[in-house]
Amino acid sequence: MKRGYSQEAFADHCGVHRTFMGTIERGESNLSFSNLVKVSKALGLTLSQLLSGLEKRADVLAKRPQVASRPESRRPKQP
């Protein structure tokens, strides 16, 4: 579903900070239930519509080989 929002405009429309929206897009943060509600309302969807097919998608992802969660270049340096 394409709405034509920039990341900043969509974050504003949802009532969250643009940098937080960026962390969500990069997989660095997760949405709380209240923020899921904000996103669904901003998109004009019910939570059921927003999350439809989630279990099937989770099953597909669970069957994929595991990959590192963060690239080596982004990992904190160990002392």
Image (cartoon, grey):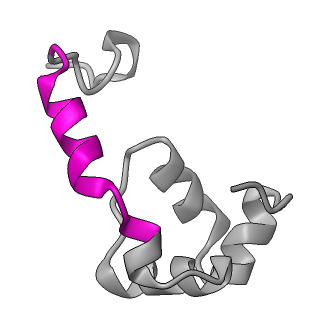
Tally of numbered tags: 0
Q: What is the chief secondary structure element of the magenta stretch?
A: helix
What percent of the width, then of the height, locates residue 63?
13, 24
Query: Is residue 40 left or right of 78 when viewed as pictured?
Result: right
Magenta region, residue range: 50-65
Query: Is residue 46 left or right of 6 when viewed as pictured?
Result: left
Q: In the image, is residue 44 above or below residue 69? A: below
What percent of the width, then of the height, locates residue 58?
22, 44
Q: In the image, is residue 21 above or below residue 57? A: below
What percent of the width, then of the height, locates residue 74?
38, 22
What percent of the width, then of the height, locates residue 67?
22, 16
Q: Residue at x 52, y 85 (%)?
A: 38
Q: Quadrant of residue 54?
A: bottom left
Q: In the image, is residue 71 above or below residue 26? A: above
The quarter of the image holding the N terminus is bottom right
Q: Nearer the viewer, residue 68 or 2?
A: 2
As drawn, which residue projects farthest toward the right?
A: 4
